[in-house]
Image (spheres, helix red, strand yellow):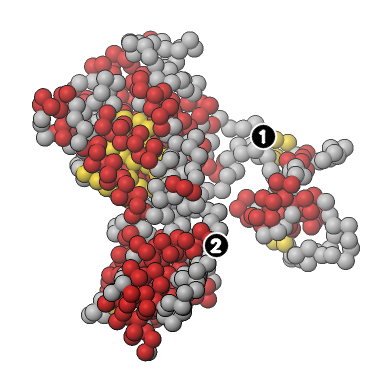
Amino acid sequence: MEPVQNQEPEDNSYLCFQRTSSLRRKWRKRYGGLDGNKLLEPNKDPDVKDYLGITDDNPQQRFEETASCSFPGTLTQNQVQTVGQGLVQKPISLVSPGSAANNGCLKPPLPQAVVQPEDRGVPLTLPWSPPQQTPSRRRAAADVLFDSFASEGRLHVNQFFEAIWNSGLHKSDPRLRECFFHLRKLQDADGSMDRNTFHRCITGFVSLILKALQGRFVIPDFSTFTEETQKLFSRCRQLLSVQEKEKDSMDSMKWGVAVCTVDGQRLTLGDWAGSLALGELSWPVVYGVAVDLLGSDLVHRYVGMEGYSRYDSPFTLTKTGIPHSPLTETGAIITTSLLQLAGRLSSEEEEKYDSVLNIIQRLCNKEHASLNCSSYQRNRKASVRLHGLSFYLQEKKCFPDKVDINAVLDLMLQCCSTELTCESGAAMAASLANGGLCPLSGDQVLSPAATRSMLSMMQVAGMKEYSSTFQFKTSIPAVSSSHGSLLAVVPGVLGLMAFSPELDACGNPWRAIHFCQELISTFQLHSFDIRTPFRQILAYRQWKAESEGYQIINVLLAAFKGDVQALRRYFLSGVDVKAVDYDGRTALHVAAAEGHAEVIRFLLENVGANPALKDRWGSSPLQEARRHNREAAIQLLQAALTS
């Protein structure tokens, strides 16, 4: 756009729009076809009016009224004034966050250490709520759900529950807890319910249930994922180190893994329920909190962003005189001291830890996360090393001004003494994989920018001296502690936490490292893996560009295996389960030949398959069942033909 001469300062903000084809596509996708370039170039046709009913005689008024509908989240109360004639809106300022317009001039940005959310010009994140649907669409979706499970007009609640659990959702999932409570409470004595009662129970939960049963989670076939992960877990359990062969103690044989995806699918294996001290796992959390409160620029004035330091002595600094990384002992001390600069944390030292603990609990969906007082007292008595490092940092003038070093060390030890289980740690890792948003509660705990910085530091320095090798083999962020726990994040997919007390020469749990490397290799989770449809059974994602021919093959394959869950998933996703292949055979023909009674019952009662349909050789499903002597299939098909 050509610059306009003698333009008012407050109009300069509109020049950030660029007339590109990509912007048009994004604008149409987000705002339903309204082209952003039309806001800048008024329509030349006088007969055409915009959707607000305002003519193009006043382009500026048209722009302001259109922008008021396009950016509802960016308006503040003082930008809209109600006048007797109607609604008059001030122009929207599109300046960068942290600055504001005042009498045509820009105020200098506030220091990041004291910027509050309301000063940044960014709308506050609202709590998660399910997508809104019209009552008619909700009822239609509920009818499809009921029809896919109903038998003779009744739905069996246990069968409905089993299908949802198979999708990977946990029984304690807070998003569905109320729905399951009402289903259990209102079911009849035989464990079934009618259509109207089912509608009452799942109102408000249809979207999530449909997403689970249609296989639209990040891991659509969770049963296959569980089976393969259990095999990996068993193979890793059988691995023994030299020390284990000599000692053969019970503590060294502990081995647990927990997985949580960004959609809330969960898996726990082995000794996952024991309490584990965070230790070094708390260092990236403290760093993320500091970046979220102060900004990465201010934090990295005091601590570097290099890979793990290979120096033998911790009494080393960078050439600029700061610690190498926030995931070293010296870097963790400096990062913890920066929390005293945060205005949003409490001024009392005891309440600062409560604020950090609250963030950890929100990342874990308020599951098991608490302070182990006995561990804290032990660490406090053995903190001579930390005091020595803090005196060295104080001599090198690495601390911010007016910092209480004793309070900093106490806060650091309290964070290291916080306890988690593998299950709650996996939920925290899934929140990090989801950009700081907890998938189970919908709570935006950390900003996406702070989460990105946190994962970046975990990737380059989280595994100590083994960080570069681990990054080469897995390409995922991870951090380990000397207590034997490892927290790994696959961004956008899942988070996991593993526990094995046996450590390698680098101070990492070697069994957990081997499990992560095998998991990444098996499910093609490496950043540079090229996923193909030929590995669809082991791949963690569905093949999205699936043609009609592939759909028919998958339906027939599910009928051949007797996989009712897969057939129900295809049915709820809109796939024609009654489709025929080039030989005229349907899923009912295949199920009858294999004798899968559950599949035949589902196809007849829920899908409405035709039991009299013949293939190219003139064979019906009943003839297929008789040819292979499938008695249960013969009875079901005969009853369907006579009814």
Residue sitting farthest toward the bottom: 642
Residue drawn at (21%, 44%) of the image = 270
Q: Is residue 454 above or below residue 464?
A: below
| Residue nearest the viewer, comparing 170 with 584 | 584
- Measured from the top left, where is residue 246 in percent x and y? 11, 24
Callout 2: 10 Å neighbours few (<14), some, many (20+)? few
Residue drawn at (49%, 74%) of the image = 616
Callout 1: 10 Å neighbours few (<14), some, many (20+)? few
Check disc 2 and report the residue beneath it: 548
Residue 107: give its label.
1
Residue drawn at (69%, 51%) of the image = 25
Q: Is residue 543 left or right of residue 4?
A: left
Q: Is residue 284 above or below residue 121?
A: above
Three-letter amino acid code at the position of disc 2 = Glu
Three-letter amino acid code at the position of disc 1 = Lys
- Measured from the top left, where is residue 587 in percent x and y? 42, 69
Q: Is residue 405 left or right of residue 250?
A: right
- Measured from the top left, where is residue 384 in percent x and y? 23, 16
- Measured from the top left, where is residue 490 in percent x and y? 42, 39
- Residue 159 occupies which quadrant of the picture? bottom left
Asked whether residue 623 appears in the rendered view, the answer is: yes
Q: Is residue 581 left or right of residue 240?
A: right
Q: Is residue 497 above or below residue 81?
A: above
Local secondary structure at mark 2: helix
How far apart, in angstroms, are the residues tagged by discs 1 and 2? 59 Å
Asked whether residue 69 appears in the rendered view, the answer is: no
